[in-house]
Amino acid sequence: MTILKCSSNKKKVDTKLVGVLLPLELHSFFSLYTVAKGITKTTIVNDELKNWVHSTQICGDDENELIKEIVVKIRAKWNTVKIKTPGKTLWDFKRELKTELRLKGISEQHIIQIIKSV
């Protein structure tokens, strides 16, 4: 039986779980706040992340710019790898890169864009 119910939008279509570690004091306040206000932690985090994305995009960091930044880092890493590991091919490097990007939660669409740009 739930005594203190939170209102929640049960729409879980096209969602992804994001785990985060919080300091105990922050978690405690966060929990108290959500129960007192009758809203979910997901609602608060979603609203704050939407605000953060909006402000980040206003500053010029759109998806294409972020992909370009990632590609620059990858190219620099490839230049180091090919010197330190002469037997490694670009194909092998890209295969490992795809796996790493997937593990980091990058979408397949963005992975394809990144790999094509390397």
Image (cartoon, rainbow, N blue to C red):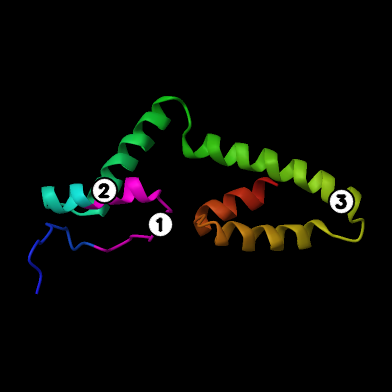
Q: Is 6 situated left or right of 55 in this image?
A: left
Q: Secondary structure at mark 2?
A: helix
Q: Residue at x 11, y 52 (%)?
A: 38
Picture quadrant of residue 98: bottom right
Q: Which mark is residue 60?
A: none
Q: Is 24 situated left or right of 93 in this image?
A: left
Picture quadrant of residue 18: bottom left
For the residues labelled 3 and 2, the Cα–Cα distance comes to: 47 Å
Instruction: Tell which tag, 2 or 1, sits nearer the viewer.
Output: 2
Sequence-first tag of 2 and 1: 1
Q: Amino acid at mark 2?
A: Phe
The residue indicated by pointer 2 is 30
Q: Amino acid at mark 3?
A: Lys
User: What segment carries the magenta color?
Assistant: 12-31
x, y percent for residue 2: 10, 69
Q: Amino acid at mark 1?
A: Val
Q: Main secondary structure of the magenta part?
A: loop
The residue indicated by pointer 3 is 82
The residue indicated by pointer 1 is 18
Is there a contact, CB below 8 Å, between mark 2 and mark 1? no
Q: Residue at x 86, y 51 (%)?
A: 82
